[in-house]
Amino acid sequence: SLAPPGTRAFRDAGGIPADRWHADQNGETLVPTHCCFCGVQCGMYLRVDHGGKVFGVEPRNHDINRMRLCPKGINAYQQVNHPDRLTAPLMRRSRDEEFREVSWEEALDFTVSEIKRIQQTYGNDAFGLLGGASLFSEKTYLVGKFARVALKSRHVDYNGRLCMVSAAGANKLAFGIDRAGNPFSDILLTDCLLIAGSNVGECFPVMTQYVWGARDRGATLIVVDPRETAIARTADIHVALKPGTDSAFFTSVLNVVIDEGLTDENFLADHATGWEELKAKAAEYPPSRAAAICGIPAEQIVQVARAFARAPKAMAWHARGIEHHSQGVENCLSVINLCTATGHIGKPGAGYGTITGQGNGQGGREHGQKSDLLPGGRSIMNEEHRRQICEIWGIEESELPPAGTSMMEMVWQMQRREIRGLIGICNNPFVSLPNYRVVKEGYDTTEFHAQFDFFLSETAANAHVVFPVTTWAEDEGVMANAEARVVKHNKAQDPPPGVRTDTWVICELARRLGAGGKFDFPDSRSVFDELRIASAGTVNDYYGITYERLEETGGIAWPCPATDHPGTPRLFEDGKTYHPDGRIHLQVVEWHPPMDPYDDEHPMSLTTGRTVAHFLSGNQTRRLGALVEQTPRPWAEIHPSHGFRNGEPVRVVTRRGSEVFPALVTEAIRPDTVFVPYHWPVPTAANALTIDALDPRSKIPEYKVCACRIEHAERIDEVPAPPVAPGHVAYPETQVSRTDPLPPTAPQGRGTSERS
């Protein structure tokens, strides 16, 4: 029988509904802040008891989320005082040893001695640093500065490389600026909303209110996705194209727009370059050709073209579904080309945006932790940009290293022993990077590896040193959400004894490496003051944003060049981009097949993504009982035509290996496609199967398509418990549901089989 999520596990554990729960506390304080998870950045209050401890959450009537929170937001507070928290540094001198808890002095001394040994023996670039896009912007600024000024290494990158860089590359090429062009509120004003490669209902649930608001006004909804997701089920047009064919589809839509005379020729003449070349390329993609490539009816292409081009105001938003490809930049450019050709740019209700996956996916790439960027979005290859930042940092231009390589390329360099030491902050590559075997080999080859985290992630469990650092609720700082709205997170409680902020650890390491004078930052506010100065006058200008203004306004969209400037929620309203000529630079796009070829052994497409209960590598959400109950394990979503029953073991095989999942049988997926969510580690890791092919421009991995086959199997692979520190036991509340062999009870799409 069909049961609500977690019911059976809850009953088996002997739980009694609402037993021993109390809704209020004497002396309670509400601390206004924002969620730590996705790029919507919902406003919330953390409930703090009279002893100064976070114990609950309330939604806040912030104008981003208007009192709404998703399942992750509701449960996020539980990680703050979770029993799995790391509260002392862990250390071992060899991976053959067990971790032991040590003092901060011993852990820092060992780390610094290993950095010096490796760099003195093999050169500065033999040591690397990998940051994260869930860090506050102040900390991302420090990551980039620490790598270049304290480590003096070119090798720094961050896990946003796995998320937003295709969109960033396309935006820079077309507009000269890297951010969404419109605020979420513009969605409420549009007449046609196109969402490509984004499972909004599960990955950005609170954003759904904007989609429903547009629908209430009568807007046409177009969803482009191989799966009939919750949001696709409600669409006027659902384009279930074959994974890896997006640019062929959008260029063909443009072909129809041109053929039917639906282009905005005045807008193109006044505001764009490259139109004639693009027109010639679009002529090569008639609907008949694209339909064959994409595996969809040619009439759908015509239908989408007419709906989008004829709408008085139309918007396009996309996410990882079209970005996680070896042609990710081209996919994004093909959407920009369509918006530009129809004149749907820079107006209320008309424009183009990218939906940020990580909480600070936008802010995390703006101020220097990306391998080719300096603060303010400056290019590290630009001589004038280098001179400007060296002046602010007080170093000689010759001391500033050149551009480094991307996150996945750094792993390949670790394999080749070109990078022999690494510090990781706020990332978990053992789950989040593709082709796990290669990742594990790269990390195992390093002579020294340190990791910052507040839980022992799968990657941290492989390190030599683990530094216990604060959660988002134990420090203050800013993030920039998917709209490029900078919001402020406030400190709600002091960290547990033995825990330090990332800022403190970075600055202390810098001091011990002899660069302490450049890292005299007692707190986040002092870092933000330097960040503001470092960004002044750039495209990514934060100078006019202050903590006080953020508290007063609830958020300010950059660029904001002065403290009396209101910010820039909508770009291009004056018809000008950030290129010197002020025009949109249209780019010719040529579709090519995915990098992993299909053959008789691997005739299907494997695609991956998120599910509503979990976030990224799951290091946080796989420890929260309610979320594990809702979605205890990954599954393989397959079409009924393959002859599986719901819950039967299905082996998914790619050229990287195979794993066995319970089948979730549904008509809501293409017959030639398999979907597996990626939040779990081996032996249930989707990313043990994905390919480490990269987009040549953005260097993003091709997560969203690789060749596979499916087979009947005998036994489903077990989900491992999250790692814990020595002497700790895995939190029991998350274990009962985790062992459930069946896929989630929540319906994932039309025609989902019931559990038996």
Image (spheres, helix red, strand yellow):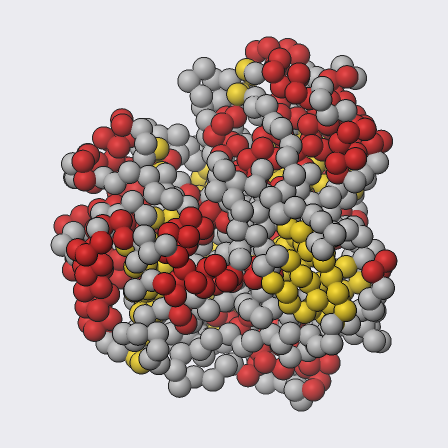
Residue 603 shows up from this direction? yes
Residue 562 shows up from this direction? no
Does residue 96 sit above or below 535 in this rendering? below
Observer-nearest of 710 and 370:
710
Q: Residue at 64%, 65% (x, y): give it.
A: 658
Does residue 185 sit above or below 382 in this rendering? below
Q: Position of residue 588 (x, y in %)?
A: 59, 23
- Number of residue marks: 0
Apparent side of residue 14 relative to residue 4 in the rendered image (left or right): left
Q: Position of residue 660 (x, y in %)?
A: 68, 69
Quarter where residue 470 is shown? bottom left
Quadrant of the rendering where the C terminus is positioned = bottom right
Does residue 84 sit above or below 631 in this rendering? below
Apparent side of residue 615 relative to residue 88 in the rendered image (left or right): right
Q: Residue at 73%, 25% (x, y): give it.
A: 285
Observer-nearest of 195 and 442:
442
Q: Residue at 59%, 80% (x, y): give it.
A: 735
Quadrant of the rendering where the N terminus is positioned = bottom right
Apparent side of residue 480 relative to residue 541 in the rendered image (left or right): right
Q: Position of residue 99 (x, y in %)?
A: 34, 79
Q: Position of residue 744 (x, y in %)?
A: 72, 69
Farthest bottom residue?
A: 14
Quarter where residue 188 is shown? top right
